[in-house]
Amino acid sequence: MLKTNANKLIKISVIGEISNPLINRLVYTISTKGKPVILPGVGGITYNLRVGDFACGWEADHVEPGASIKNKENDLTFGYAANTALNVFSCIGNQAIIVSGDAKGSFGVVTGKHGGIEHVLVDFQPEILEKLIPGDKILIKALGVGLKLIDYPDVIIMNMDPKFLEVLNLKKIKDKLQVPVTHVIPAEFMGSGIGKNQVYSGDYDLQMFDKKSVEEYGLDDLRIGDIVAISNADHSFGRIYHQGAISIGIVVHSNCITAGHGPGITSLMTSSLGKIIPKINTSANIANLLNLRSDI
């Protein structure tokens, strides 16, 4: 067992409501081939895309799995502070509770955060998804902000419930930690989301427009919910290219057709000194780790 400060963390309520699907006024999205297309995108309840499903191959752009939630409280004093709190305090693996509507009392799990649109993504079983409608409120018992590894100060943890950290089954190798991942991705493949000064909300996108590179690194079989490593990437204070650093994240939304975009990855761990050793494990997906599905 890794020593953590989990017993010192605060568990706090944050709430959001299921958002409507959104489409911009221009309607068309322009692909990297210069083709105008119309595709489903962010928001709403996605009935046939969950963690464990392939991230690519869909007629979609930035589609979010399961239910997408947002806090619409408009606090003009602090500028949408309630939704910021929802996005920052919610952590991967947190319990989500439906508190209104026909599915009231049912439970789900936080599986991702999507920047730009500032949504928190929640997985529910299919029979629960069928009962949901946009506007239903979902309470999250947020726990994880401030989580630290006592004996590994050079490995920074973010966006993870302590129980999810446990099921990752990290291995101690001297002064480093071995982390199971499905893929190792070079930092130069990463696009939209670079430039922010914090990684405690949102994601950044894996560009998949170069077919040769996709084949070389085996990214065709990338799944939503996969735990992945990004080499030469430091997420300590924002996301930067840094040789020797390594970061761990989780794939949170589908592939995209727009320049600079692709499957989104929310940060989970980082070490600017390279104290993380990725080990390939094709089962390293949140759907398997938390037993959310039995059909993959």
Image: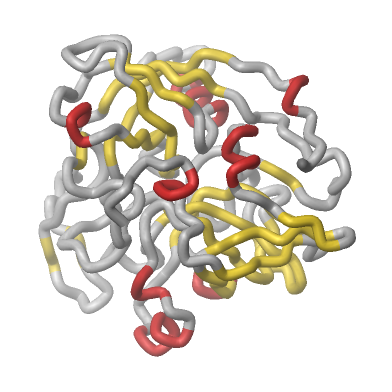
Instruction: Count the marks.
Output: 0
For the residue pair 185 and 115, the one nearer the viewer reads as: 185
Locate residue 280 relative to residue 61 in the image: left or right: right
**Looking at the image, residue 23 lies above or below residue 138:** below
Locate residue 49 relative to residue 194 in the image: left or right: left
Report the residue at 57% width, 70% height from top.
Answer: 280
Report the residue at 19% width, 37% height from top.
Answer: 21
Locate residue 24 relative to residue 106 in the image: left or right: left
- The percent coordinates of residue 192 (x first, y second) are 45, 59
Q: Which quadrant of the structure image shows residue 205?
A: bottom left
Q: Is residue 13 visible?
A: yes
Locate residue 245 relative to residue 193 in the image: left or right: right
Query: Among all residues in the image, which is located at the extreme front?
Result: 294
- The percent coordinates of residue 28 (x first, y second) are 13, 57
Report the residue at 14% width, 29% height from top.
Answer: 130
Report the residue at 64% width, 40% height from top.
Answer: 166
User: Quarter of the image containing the N terminus?
Assistant: top right
- The percent coordinates of residue 225 (x first, y second) are 42, 52
User: Quarter of the image containing the C terminus?
Assistant: bottom left
- The percent coordinates of residue 188 (x first, y second) are 56, 74
Q: Which quadrant of the structure image shows residue 75?
A: top left
Give the colour scheme of this rendering.
secondary structure
**Looking at the image, residue 115 lies above or below residue 138:** below
**Looking at the image, residue 211 lies above or below residue 24:** below
Q: Is residue 255 visible?
A: no
